[in-house]
Image (cartoon, rainbow, N blue to C red):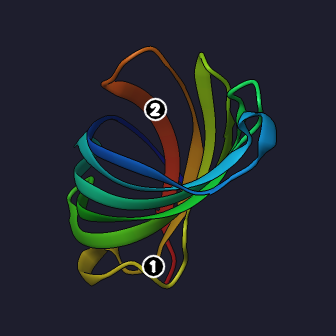
């Protein structure tokens, strides 16, 4: 049985540095970020992104985030894998909770969701989750 959760997140820190720059504004960057979550997810996430920029400012990214806090009434930590695309006005992210990386009462967590971001946070999102033995 999947449960639907609702939460918001806000960026606390965003440190982005290029590690490869190419002609025409193309670049690859590495990001270390911290996010605060409220709602059915409460806690703080530490994120590592790898991002690829096209000349027009759009691109794609992958990342891993470890969130420490709670989902519903269960506390612990879990890891979410992020994949997505962006342009100068919006971001679309698909994230999945990585099975086997939940700790304490969040052990067995599975699920994820899609987030579409525009403007400035806090950003609302909906996700599905369950716990497998």
Identify the element where label 2 is drawn: strand
Q: Residues within 10 Å of mark 2 (few under 14, many from 20)?
A: some
Residue 7 in the image: x percent, y percent? Answer: 34, 36
Identify the element where label 1 is drawn: loop
Residue 97 in view here? yes
Residue 81 in view here? no
Residue 62 in the image: x percent, y percent? Answer: 63, 57
- Residue at figure coordinates x 31%, y 82% from the top left: 103
Which residue in the protein does label 1 denote?
108
- Residue at figure coordinates x 55%, y 78% from the top left: 99
Which residue in the protein does label 2 denote?
125
Query: In the rendered view of the protein, which quadrant contains the N terminus?
Result: bottom right
- Residue at figure coordinates x 71%, y 30% from the top left: 58
Residue closer to the observer: 57 or 107: 57
**Relative to 42, does residue 90 appear above or below in the rendering?**
above
Disc nearest the viewer among 1 and 2: 2
- Residue at figure coordinates x 26%, y 53% from the top left: 72
- Label 1, label 2: how far apart the Cα atoms are: 22 Å
**Relative to 109, does residue 63 appear above or below in the rendering?**
above
Q: Residues within 10 Å of mark 1 (few under 14, many from 20)?
A: some
For residue 104, which quarter of the picture?
A: bottom left
Residue 30 in the image: x percent, y percent? Answer: 51, 58
User: How many numbered tags mark residues here?
Assistant: 2
Q: Residue furthest front?
A: 23
Whether residue 80 sits left or right of residue 43 in the image: it is: right
């Amino acid at each position: 049985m999947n449960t639907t959760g609702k939460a918001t997140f806000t960026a606390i820190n965003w440190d982005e540095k290029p590690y490869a720059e190419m002609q025409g504004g193309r670049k690859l960057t590495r990001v270390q970020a911290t996010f605060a979550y409220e709602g059915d997810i409460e806690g703080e996430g530490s994120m590592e992104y790898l991002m690829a920029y096209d000349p027009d400012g759009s691109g794609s990214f992958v990342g891993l985030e470890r969130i420490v806090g709670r989902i519903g009434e269960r506390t612990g930590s879990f890891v979410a894998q992020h994949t997505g695309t962006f342009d100068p006005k919006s971001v679309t992210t698909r994230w999945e909770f990585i099975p086997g990386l939940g700790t304490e009462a969040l052990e067995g967590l599975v699920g994820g969701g899609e987030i579409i971001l525009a403007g400035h946070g806090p950003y609302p999102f909906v996700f599905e989750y369950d716990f497998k033995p």
